[in-house]
């Protein structure tokens, strides 16, 4: 018999609290990790939130759900970075995790850990104003 205390589905965190990418990078991959166990299926929703970077102008907004099957401990959220020819200061947006849920029959699930969001800074690559 498997005891409830032996079931360790873990919890979610974004691996790094911040990411810095050049404007011409094309994309950024945000690493979402499962810590503290790998038992059962767990899932978490994600979304981008504009700060000083403008959605559809500086990056393409995304939202969705990551599903971690038993044994999986890392998934990626890919956000497209849009390049322009305008000199500008560094701009930022967030990627947030929310609504974490355990799959059927999973117990002891802790949801998200201490890093449920990250800030992505887009560094300008233009040397002159157009």
Image (cartoon, grey):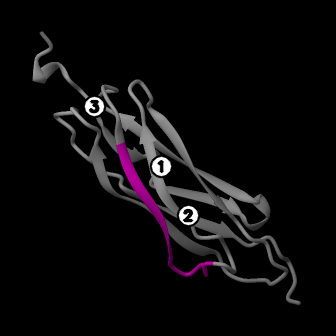
Task: Identify the mark at residue 16; answer none if there is no mark.
Answer: 1
Tell me which corner region of the image, top left, top right, bottom left or bottom right, holds residue 72: top left
Q: Secondary structure at mark 1?
A: loop
Residue nearer the viewer, 50 or 38: 38
Please state the extent of the stretch shown in magenta in the rendering. 43-55
Q: Does residue 57 appear anywhere in the picture?
A: yes
The front one of 4 and 18 is: 4
- Which numbered disc, 3 or 2, marks the residue that appears first in the sequence? 3
Q: Residue at x 30, y 51 (%)?
A: 100
Residue 63 vs 90, above or below: the answer is above
**What distance separates the C-alpha of mark 1 from that of mark 2?**
10 Å
Q: Quadrant of residue 5?
A: top left
Disc nearest the viewer among 3 and 2: 3
- In this picture, is 124 found above or below 69? below
Q: Which residue is mark 2?
A: 120
Disc 3 element: loop
Q: Is residue 108 magenta?
A: no
Compare marks 1 and 3 and give the one earlier in the sequence: 3
Dot in front, 1 or 3: 3
Q: CA distance from mark 3 to mark 2?
A: 28 Å
Is residue 112 visible in the rendered structure shown here? no
- Residue position for label 3: 9
């Amino acid at each position: 018999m498997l005891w409830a205390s032996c079931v360790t589905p873990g919890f979610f965190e974004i691996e790094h609290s911040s990411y810095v990418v050049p404007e011409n990078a094309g994309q950024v991959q945000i690493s979402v990790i499962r810590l503290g166990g790998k038992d059962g299926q767990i899932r978490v929703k994600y979304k981008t939130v504009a700060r000083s970077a403008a959605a559809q102008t500086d990056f393409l907004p995304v939202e969705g759900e990551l599903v971690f099957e038993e044994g999986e401990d890392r998934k990626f959220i890919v956000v497209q970075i849009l390049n322009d020819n305008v000199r500008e200061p560094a701009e930022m947006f967030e990627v947030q995790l929310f609504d974490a849920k355990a799959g059927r029959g999973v117990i002891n699930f802790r949801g998200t850990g201490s890093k449920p969001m990250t800030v992505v800074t887009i560094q300008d690559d233009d040397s002159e104003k157009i």
